[in-house]
Image (cartoon, rainbow, N blue to C red):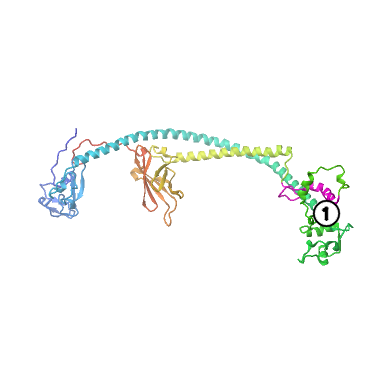
Amino acid sequence: MGCRAVEVKRPRGVSLSNRVFYDETKPFTCLDGSKTIPFDQVNDDYCDCTDGSDEPGTSACSNGNFHCTNAGYRPIYIPSSRVNDGICDCCDTTDEYNSGVNCQNTCREMGRKEREELQKKAEMAREGMLLKQKYIDEFRKGREEKQARLQELVEERQSLQSEVDSLRAKKEEAETPEKEAKDAHKKEWEERREAEKAAFEKKRSLEAFTELDEDSDGILSVQELLSHSEFDSDGDGSISDQEAQDLLSSSQSVDVSTFQDSVWPQIKEKYKSKSDASSPPPIEERTESHSEIPHEDGDDNGEDGGDDEDDVDDNDDFNEDHRAPPGKSQGEESEMPPYDDTTQQQLIDSAEAARNEYESASKSLRDMEDTIRNLEKEISLDFGPQGEFSYLYGQCYELSTSEYIYRLCPFNRVTQKPKVGGSETNLGIWNTWAGPENDKFSAMKYDQGTGCWQGPNRSTQVKLLCGKETVVTSTSEPSRCEYLMEFYTPAACQQPAEIPQSEDHDEL
């Protein structure tokens, strides 16, 4: 049952706390001490005091304040200029005592609604506090487990580091003979390729010399070159004596050795054999088609065949040995041959196994170090007076508006992404708690976000409010590139204050 307060007699517009300054048996001294006047001049509708304190119940002083008692609700002050202005500002109607306006006293109803709202908030705070206590308990237990796990990992890291160092040494030891074997194998292959290429070129030059030496006397003369217009150097379509002599190093003739050393390098790109002129298939195609025809005994000596067959038979060994697949020059191996079994197994495979062991251990060490860093970071964060905000770590909460999706990841970052096209924008990275000195855990500060065009880097202030659920409810941009979020969480709840039961009271 409510308790009704006793009304204390005091001048109109004076609060209970200021009643002591208004003693009807004494002269009134202005509250700013500027003047003392007879008490009968208080509320006489004439302003005597410069601070307006002599007219608390009238509108005579422009800087005065009228006190609404509002029994059943809560008292307020209104400017004296609103007294008797025809508008009911006090729910108890006391400000319109002489204006003729018919005001209804709504203080009881307003008080009832306010108490209902306070009851709802108190109930929500109580439910939030239960969750908050759960988060605190989980934080304490989890923190102990994380610290123990961190200590284990730090000790294991030392052992794993030793293993990695040992495997690195083993790997390097295995790689030394492997490299030597690989280098030797490659060198041998390259030397063989060069030798094959040189042999191929020598064979080509010998074949060319044989064909160019029309009288087969072992000497190539100027006269014998004149029928080969492909050696024309001045572009007139034929080769002159002088041009032929120039090719023969200013000589009239050369032997096969001189031809191979001096003449062949000049003409090998231009040279066309008679078989080329008659347009037979290329050497590779000829060899392939020829290899499909079985040889009869005695064919190798060319006795049963004509000139063309002799040409093909004479080149069989060469074509079989040097014919290259598409994309490979004749006389060259396109790929390095495999290592011998002993080298492969004892050196190459052994080194590869050592590398794999080392890489596997190194990856385990890197993963362990990442886990250690993450644990150290989490343990070092300030999750509130009792760790109640720790449950937010590693979580993200979204708010969808008509244009954007806002994403808050506590202790990490805030982002904004357009619903249609466009990339994500960083609205700030976690910095610190940013509430007032007496309540610093009521707000979070995220800064150093994406820079604005000709402006500062984006930043976000997150206001934390008590709620049974964890949810972002609103986002705004009070200043350019400075955002404000409202974030409800049980961790922000406080023990609710006792709600007054009385419906009638002078002042709260």
Q: Residue furthest right?
A: 217
- Measured as percent of width and height from the top left, residue 18 is found at 18, 46
Mark 1, Cα crowd under 10 Å, few <14 / some 14-19 / many 20+, is: some
Give whichever of 359, 311 is nearer the camera: 311
- Measured as percent of width and height from the top left, residue 206 is found at 83, 54
- Measured as percent of width and height from the top left, residue 2 is found at 19, 34
Q: Which residues are magenta?
A: 306-334
Give whichever of 490, 339 is nearer the camera: 339
Q: Residue at x 81, y 61 (%)?
A: 228
The residue that disc 1 covers is: 207
Residue type at numbered disc 1 = Glu
| Quadrant in which residue 216 is drawn | bottom right
Please tell me whether mark 1 sits on a helix, a strand or a loop.
Answer: helix
Vertical relation: 72 (above or below) 227: above
Is residue 242 visible from the viewing direction of this image? yes
Q: Residue at x 72, y 49 (%)?
A: 328
Whether the magenta-drawn stretch holds residue 491 is answered as no
Q: Is residue 42 left or right of residue 442?
A: left
Q: Residue at x 57, y 39 (%)?
A: 363
- Measured as percent of width and height from the top left, residue 48 is found at 14, 55
Is residue 508 visible from the viewing direction of this image? no
Whether the magenta-drawn stretch holds residue 328 is answered as yes
Q: Quadrant of the N terminus?
A: top left
| Quadrant in which residue 183 is drawn | top right
| Quadrant in which residue 275 is drawn | bottom right
Q: Is residue 286 left or right of residue 504?
A: right
Q: Quadrant of the C terminus?
A: top left
Give whichever of 454, 237 is nearer the camera: 237
Number of marks: 1
